[in-house]
Amino acid sequence: MTTILGVPLQALLGQLLVGLINGSFYALLSLGLAVIFGLLRVINFAHGAQYMLGAFAALLLLKGLGLNYWFALVLAPVLVGLFGAVIERLFLSRLYKLDPLYGLLFTFGLALTIEGVFRWLYGSSGQPYSVPELLRGTVNLGFMFLPIYRGWVVIASLVACLVVWFVIERTKLGAYLRAATENPVLVQAFGINVPLLLTLTYALGAALAAFAGVLAAPIYQVSPLMGTNLIIVVFAVVVVGGMGSILGAVFTGYMLGIAEGLTKVFFPEASNIVIFVIMAIVLLLRPAGLFGKEA
Amino acid sequence: MNPLLEVSDLQAWYGESHVLHGVNLHVNEGETICILGRNGMGKTTTLRTIMGILRKRRGTIRFAGEDMMGVPLHRSARAGLGFVPEERGIFASLTVDENMTLPPKVAEGGMTSDEIYTLFPNLLERRGSQGTKLSGGEQQMLAMARILRTGCRCILLDEPTEGLAPVIIQRIGDVLRTLKARGMTVVLVEQNFRFAEKVADRFYLMDHGQMVEEFPTADLPQHRDALHRALGV
Ligand SMILES: Nc1ncnc2c1ncn2[C@@H]1O[C@H](COP(=O)(O)OP(=O)(O)OP(=O)(O)O)[C@@H](O)[C@H]1O
Ligand SMILES: [Mg+2]
């Protein structure tokens, strides 16, 4: 059997794949956080709850309305995005004039409330969501068996990240977003409805989190606390990548997922903390993050 | 005929600090007026308040017959007001072309891209560059060019010649004369009245948040000594 540094190749590739899957979720979630932070200057602590809402929306759409995974993949982000828009209009928009700490505290409270309500309604234990028919089974890659659904998650998240990048860097709407990130007052003086742009951006961030939640539903159990556990790691990813950098968030997400996977092979005991160790080192050497601009 | 822009007893505050103390001015359609005044007298604040950026304000602002006091900032441009800020406001994360096309068109009759690039040929060569990689003069040209596309009726132009070389200042003068020929209304803020006298029809002198003098360009010679003293140049 082939080994690398005394580790069987199978195990190495297996953990690389796990790392890539986790990295896909880190990338999607930190991308949403970076987009929201860039324009709204709000650290969205409710991001994990919005991810959980996406997964629950998929589960409830299936159980309640019989709508399958593919409907959920479209409908859950739309529903959670609308919810985000309402939250931004009713609450967040009133906090921009205040210290950024208020936005953080509000979204933190919102996350606790949403998770509390879901725990009360559905209990803390996870509920399974089955892999859609089309994506069941494995393919033999020659060197390993790849579960098709996992391959799909990697591709779907890559495509979603690319689409968001394209919208922001190459379209008119993206030009408004970038300009408003730099100087919202001037953009509004040019006749663009910046308050509406802020609402749309928050909705987009929430929708991205929900999309990740639907992707996650068949892999992890659907539970009210699924976002809480993940979001702490995602915040570390954002700190490493640098707040506000779109590509930085995506790239760092995949890299740290893979770093975590590799650590599981070579030093399993450290795999749960490796991202935080990297975060500490980056904070010491480059406080603005790998891709952030030094203030 | 009613003036296109009419401001009376305009007061404005930054937080608690009262900066405009009853500004009165009017601008007729097609006219270029120039506001002179020393640093910190409230010239920029006057433009920002007319535009609707500074919201803590009192008094009246009528533009094209419309009361502008209750109009939200993003509707000012739609009403036909164009704003070119003192710091130029070129966006670093946008290319020259993206900067140029950022402000939406608000009416027919704005300049076409061809006309703009004829007026500002060096912007054409640098279309793909990052906006803030341009020289100071080019950034000023870009800041004006992007407003000319929109079809606005009146431009609020804040110290366009500040810190620029004489040849560039001359180009900006040419542009202002071209605009005048097209019937554009301009509110120009300047400290350089040798430049302003070549483009303006009328002058206001601002002092501590109020207009203290108003005279047509033809009367500039008899005000010259007083202006030298007032502006400290
Ligand atoms: N953002 C602000 N917050 C508080 N005070 C301000 C602010 N901007 C300007 N001021 C004050 O308002 C007064 C008028 O400033 P303004 O910028 O309108 O002057 P100005 O005539 O345009 O001067 P300059 O020729 O230097 O551009 C000044 O006393 C200035 O210190
Ligand atoms: Mg000024």
Image: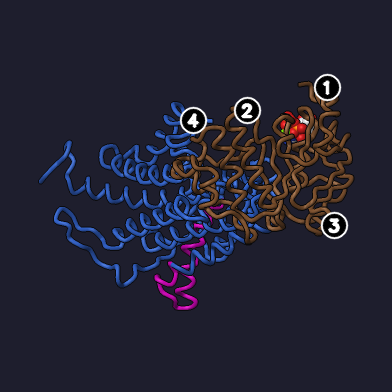
Chain colours: A blue, B brown
Which chain is mark 1 on?
Answer: B
Instruction: Tell me whether circle 1 and circle 3 mark residues in contact (CB < 8 Å).
Output: no
Q: Let me know if residue A223 appears in the view.
A: yes
Residue at image coords 58%, 48%: B146
Which chain is mark 4 on?
Answer: A
Q: CA distance from mark 1 to mark 3?
A: 35 Å
Residue at image coords 43%, 67%: A73
The residue carrying mark 2 is B163
Looking at this rendering, what residue extends furthest in the left direction? A1
Counting residues from the start of the chain, the first of labels 1 and 2 encountered is 2
**Front of the two marks 1 and 3:** 3
Asked if both marks, 3 and 4, belong to the same chain, the answer given is no
User: Where B207 falls versus A177 (above or below)?
Assistant: above
| Quarter of the displayed picture in which ligand 1 can be seen | top right
Which residue type carries mark 3?
Answer: Met
Between A219 and A214, the one lying in front of the other is A214
Q: Is residue A204 magenta?
A: no
Counting residues from the start of the chain, the first of labels 1 and 3 encountered is 3
Residue B229 image label: 1
The residue carrying mark 3 is B1
Q: CA distance from mark 1 to mark 4?
A: 51 Å
Which residue type carries mark 2?
Answer: Gly
Residue numbers of the magenta segment:
A46-73
User: Percent position (x, y) of residue A35?
Assistant: 51, 49
Q: CA distance from mark 1 to mark 2?
A: 22 Å
Residue A287 image label: 4
